[in-house]
Amino acid sequence: MQIREILTLKSADIHSIAPTDSVASAVDRLVGLGVGSLVVLKNGEMVGLLTERDVVKGMLKQGCDLKDAEVSTIMETEPVVASADDSVDYARDVMTKSHIGHLPILEGDKLFGIISFHDVAKASLKEAKFENNLLKRYIKHWPE
């Protein structure tokens, strides 16, 4: 299964924020949308990724008062990315090894979408269930 297939099942919305926006507005947006990450866009181009984890790390690094700090001071400027044509197995592997929960997906140089580890887990379970059902059907009709 390819990452592209996961993205077809998800909303096409890409939640974003500008690097000059305040961390307070980013937190408000994360909570309001019920998401764990925001793509940081400047002039329509991805310049980083901001996750809940980045906010917590920023609190440790800069102190708990981040409300006036800019997103650019705590965002990940070189996030791990994948291609829409990469496999779900690749996404699961790179997310696990990199200890990340959100993976921006590119098609060429353009941002195509973003997937979460939850999306990857759901797709992996769906694929395993499908294969399991095929094997059960094959065994049930095994020639004697």
Image (cartoon, grey):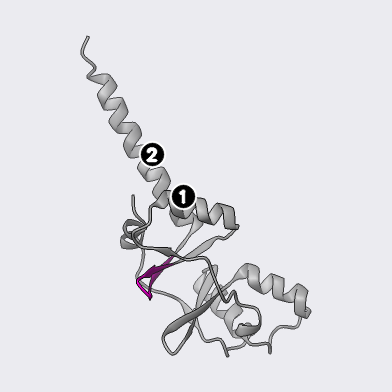
90 on left or right of 100 = left
Q: Residue at x 58, y 81 (%)?
A: 26
- Residue 22 on image: x %, y %: 62, 87
What is the three-letter code of the residue carrying label 2?
Answer: Ala
> In this figure, which residue is indicated by the disc labeled 1?
121
Q: CA distance from mark 2 to mark 1?
A: 10 Å
Spot occupied by residue 89 in the image (x, y as percentages of width and height): 43, 48
Circle 2 sits on which residue?
A: 128
Q: Is residue 108 rendered magenta in the image?
A: yes
In this picture, which residue range is highlighted in magenta?
105-114
Q: Secondary structure at mark 1?
A: helix
Task: Kindly identify the amino acid type of the residue bearing the numbered disc 1.
Answer: Ala
Q: Are marks 2 and 1 in contact (CB under 8 Å)?
A: no
Q: Eyeballing the image, is 137 above or below 120? A: above
- Residue 18, given in percent of the width and then of the height, sits at 52, 86
Q: Is residue 65 left or right of residue 119?
A: right
Residue at 34%, 54% in the rendered image: 2
Q: Residue at x 37, y 44 (%)?
A: 126
Q: Main secondary structure of the magenta part?
A: strand
Which residue occupies the foreground of this view, 43 or 22?
Answer: 43
Residue 6, quarter of picture: bottom left
Q: At numbered mark 2, what does the secondary structure look like: helix, strand or loop?
A: helix
**Label 1 packing within 10 angstroms: few (<14), some (14-19), many (20+):** some
